[in-house]
Image: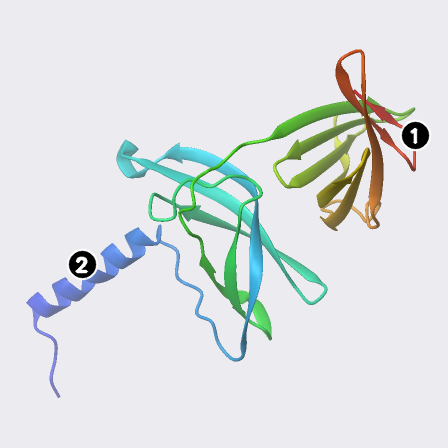
């Protein structure tokens, strides 16, 4: 029976360490079985310095949909994928039987333009916050103590003076399960929104 000599074993250990370091010490998810392609969308981005303060990395949160299920994951990227923005999309290949086994194909397409609007509203028992960031629509509802009691992320489209937001992830409950419509208008030089279902005005 042959054994590895100490020098070969050291080389293998070094190569394994380099491989894990390049993947930020995360084991890759190997795709098994029948695979399908779908689209991933970045819903959150956190910028930080790279290893030992050199360069930069981004910790991104992304989601993708398979059939009627939404999957959310975190990933660390660097200059190989380029800096990314909330709302950027990319290709994903995953196992149809278990979409948690998937591979991302994030390309360096440049950050592009960054669009953001903030709105705030109140009801009798809660306050509300809306952020429109690029192609995504974020809604949060807080109780009087500041605790989040409802939250959702939606894609949206603008038809004339109406914003139609279609939620596809709600982390607290299913209050925002159907399409939400907002009237968008300007008053005294400031944009405002009115929720056409609840009549809450956002400034």
Q: In terms of depth relative to the viewer, which is nearer, 194 or 69?
A: 194
Q: Between tags 1 and 2, which lies in front?
A: 1
Q: At x 39% / y 56%, what residue is drawn? A: 26
Q: Find the residue positioned furthest to the top.
A: 188
Q: Is residue 157 above or below residue 68?
A: above
Spot occupied by residue 61 in the image (x, y as percentages of width and height): 54, 46
Q: In terms of depth relative to the viewer, which is nearer, 33 or 160?
A: 160
**Label 2 CA crowd tier, 10 Å (few <14, some 14–19, many 20+):** few
Q: Is residue 97 above or below residue 131?
A: below
For marks 1 and 2, give the CA distance.
62 Å
SS type, badge 1: loop
Q: At x 75% / y 16%, what residue is drawn? A: 190
Image quadrant of residue 153?
A: top right
Image quadrant of residue 132?
A: top right
> In this figure, which residue is indicated by the disc labeled 2?
14
Spot occupied by residue 20 in the image (x, y as percentages of width and height): 30, 56
Spot occupied by residue 104 in the image (x, y as percentages of width and height): 46, 59
Q: At x 57% / y 63%, what residue is drawn? A: 38
> In this figure, which residue is indicated by the disc labeled 1?
199
Instruction: Residue 145: tell me if it is visible.
Output: no
Mark 1 and mark 2 residues within 8 Å of each other at the beta carbon: no
Pointer 1 or 2: first along the chain: 2
């Amino acid at each position: 029976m042959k054994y590895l000599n100490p020098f070969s074993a050291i080389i293998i250990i070094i190569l394994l360490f380099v491989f894990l370091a390049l993947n930020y010490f995360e084991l890759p998810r190997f795709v098994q079985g029948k695979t399908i392609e779908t689209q991933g969308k970045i819903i959150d981005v956190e910028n930080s310095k790279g290893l030992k303060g050199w360069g930069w990395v981004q910790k991104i949160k992304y989601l993708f949909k398979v059939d009627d299920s939404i999957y959310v994951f975190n990933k660390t990227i660097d200059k190989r994928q380029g800096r990314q923005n909330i709302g950027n999309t990319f290709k994903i290949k995953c196992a149809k039987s278990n979409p948690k086994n998937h591979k991302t194909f994030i390309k360096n397409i440049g950050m592009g333009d960054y669009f953001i609007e903030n709105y705030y509203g109140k009801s009798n028992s809660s306050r509300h916050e809306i952020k429109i960031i690029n192609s995504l629509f974020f809604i949060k509802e807080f109780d009087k103590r500041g605790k989040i009691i409802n939250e959702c992320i939606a894609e949206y489209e603008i038809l004339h003076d109406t914003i139609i937001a279609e939620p596809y992830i709600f982390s607290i409950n299913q209050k925002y399960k159907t399409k939400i419509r907002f009237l968008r208008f300007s008053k005294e030089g400031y944009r405002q929104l009115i929720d056409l279902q609840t009549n809450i005005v956002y400034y």
